[in-house]
Image (cartoon, rainbow, N blue to C red):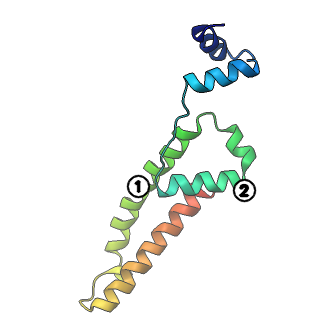
Amino acid sequence: MNDAEILAKAERGEGLTEEEVRRYQELVPPVHHVYGKYGTLALDYLENHAPAKMWGIENLPEYLHGIDRQAEEMEEVLREKLLKSEQYKRTGDYLTDVRRLNAMNAAIEEEILNELVYV
């Protein structure tokens, strides 16, 4: 069987023999996806705590890239909102401002994790 026939057979979802699988793997190199922080955390969560949900996701790379995009948007919105709050406004004292900034970043991350990653 030639390469084109093996590729066509795999595309149709027909069963491949062991030899055909080896040849297919040579012809089609695996795609390595790189995710951001929250996409990677979501993948780790799905693999270790919700494998059944992971199997139910039709296009996992698209889903994980979507998590990254949503997290980025959510971070922007929350940061804008929290900077207007009295609790996180700058005081002029460096150490106090750093503590407030760290607390705000922790609150934003916790919200993202709860709303997007660990769902």
Residue 19 x/y as whole percent: 72, 19
Packing grade of label 2 (10 A; few <14, some 14-19, many >=20) is few
Visible residue check, residue 111:
yes
Element at badge 1? helix
Badge 2 is on which residue?
Answer: 49
Q: Is residue 23 left or right of residue 91?
A: right
- Is 109 situated above or below 12? below
**Where is 87 relative to 57, above or below?**
below
Q: Residue at x 41, y 79 (%)?
A: 102
Where residue 5 appears, as percent x and y from the top left, is: 62, 8
Which mark is drawn over residue 55? none
Please report the residue visible at 58 percent of the width from the left and 54 percent of the height from the top: 42
Judging depth in this view, the residue of 17 and 116 nearest the camera is: 17
Q: Please tell me which residue lies in front, 119 or 83.
A: 119
Which element is circle 2 on?
A: helix
Disc count in the image? Answer: 2
